[in-house]
Amino acid sequence: MNRIQHTRESLIAMLRRHDVNPTHQRIEIAYALFGHGAHLSADQIMARVNGRHSETSKATVYNTLNLFLEKQLIREVIVDPNKVFYDPNTEPHYHLYDADTGELTDIDASEVTISGLPQLPAGVVTEGVDVIVRVRSRLR
Amino acid sequence: MNRIQHTRESLIAMLRRHDVNPTHQRIEIAYALFGHGAHLSADQIMARVNGRHSETSKATVYNTLNLFLEKQLIREVIVDPNKVFYDPNTEPHYHLYDADTGELTDIDASEVTISGLPQLPAGVVTEGVDVIVRVRSRLR
DNA sequence: AAGAGGAGTTAGACACAGTCCAACCGTTGC
DNA sequence: GCAACGGTTGGACTGTGTCTAACTCCTCTT
Ligand SMILES: [Mn+2]
Ligand SMILES: [Mn+2]
Ligand SMILES: [Zn+2]
Ligand SMILES: [Zn+2]
């Protein structure tokens, strides 16, 4: 687990580096995601950002998350059919998903090797390889 | 690609084997999925089943797909944040997803090796490992 | 044949994540 | 002061998927 300290200043710098104008709302959302560390859904981010008093609208949360995605600040993890998780970790890594608790954990990519994937037809370019280990913790 | 011929009779037998009472609607839905071969979303299945004249309601399509899942006749593939794909192939295998065309293709599991996945905490049981190769075909 | 019961199906209401839009706000430049 | 522009906003809207209460269809019992 990364123990990076995210100051307001370092977040602003990061936004600028990725060509994102650092507005108040964007900084708050970046803080929610990078400060917490990992894997929040849009409504969890919404809740964190608007903890004390309402500050940021639903539209802005989605606008900002999609902007961050486009600018490659974050990535999305699709494991649950009814909500997307946003991942502040853009390094290549894999995921472990507990369907019972809803918890999503990182698996270090450097430990894992995948071999034998077929080569792709011409003109097709790989965006990434997702690996999701699905588990259950509650006994059935 | 599997070239299995699915007769009405063999589908009924399959449903019975999985403890599913073979009603008209269930046979139609099984036919849509197994007849077509691979990876349809709920509304694609709906469209195939109700091709000529309306026969099967949305509720029944979802009821039936969830029943088939529960009875392990099919599996679900979660790659697109706004629709689930249903997969008549329950053998272990992986997927290739083209985000531009929306096409989902199988990757034979026997060719692929994954090593180095961490072992899990006690009491946690693996449901499966999903591998999704994400590609783009349209040049950007 | 008549009725009870149970499994399955149905239309339509509903829930809810995510998008869209037109009005609005805040800063910058003239 | 005022225009211009990027960003934000509430609220309407869309698309998947679920829920419910009424209904249909079979089978079983008498
Ligand atoms: Mn604030
Ligand atoms: Mn028919
Ligand atoms: Zn992650
Ligand atoms: Zn498949």
Image (spheres, coloured by chain):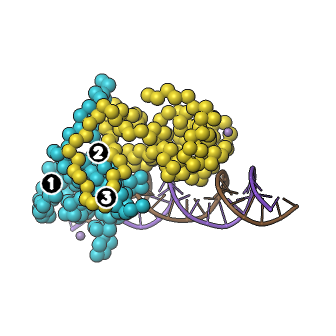
Chain colours: A yellow, B cyan, C purple, D brown
| Quarter assignment of residue A77 | top left
Quadrant holding the C terminus of chain B: bottom left
Q: Residue B74 versus residue C29: which sits nearer the camera? A: C29
Name the side, left or right, on which B21 lies relative to A16: left
Vertical comparison of B21 with D2: above or below: above
Q: Residue C19 versus residue B32: which sits nearer the camera? A: C19
How far is the residue under mark 3 from the one under mark 1?
Answer: 37 Å
Q: Which residue is mark 2?
A: B131
Q: Which percent across, then down, holds residue B14?
A: 15, 54
Label 2 lies in what chain?
B
Quadrant holding the N terminus of chain B: bottom left
Q: Which mark is residue B14?
A: 1
Is the residue at mark 2 in contact range of ligand 4, meaning its CB lies under 8 Å from it?
Answer: no
Task: Say what amino acid the circle numbered 1 marks.
Answer: Met
Callouts 1 and 2 on one subunit = yes
Label 3 lies in what chain?
A
Name the side, left or right, on which C26 lies relative to B15: right
Vertical comparison of B17 with B43: above or below: above
> From this viewpoint, is residue A75 visible?
yes
Q: Secondary structure at mark 2?
A: strand
- Of callouts 1 and 2, the N-terminal one: 1
Q: Which percent across, then down, holds residue A13?
A: 60, 39
Q: Which mark is residue A124?
A: 3
Residue at x 32% of width, y 41% of height: A131
Q: Secondary structure at mark 3?
A: loop
**Ligand 2 located in image quadrant:** bottom left
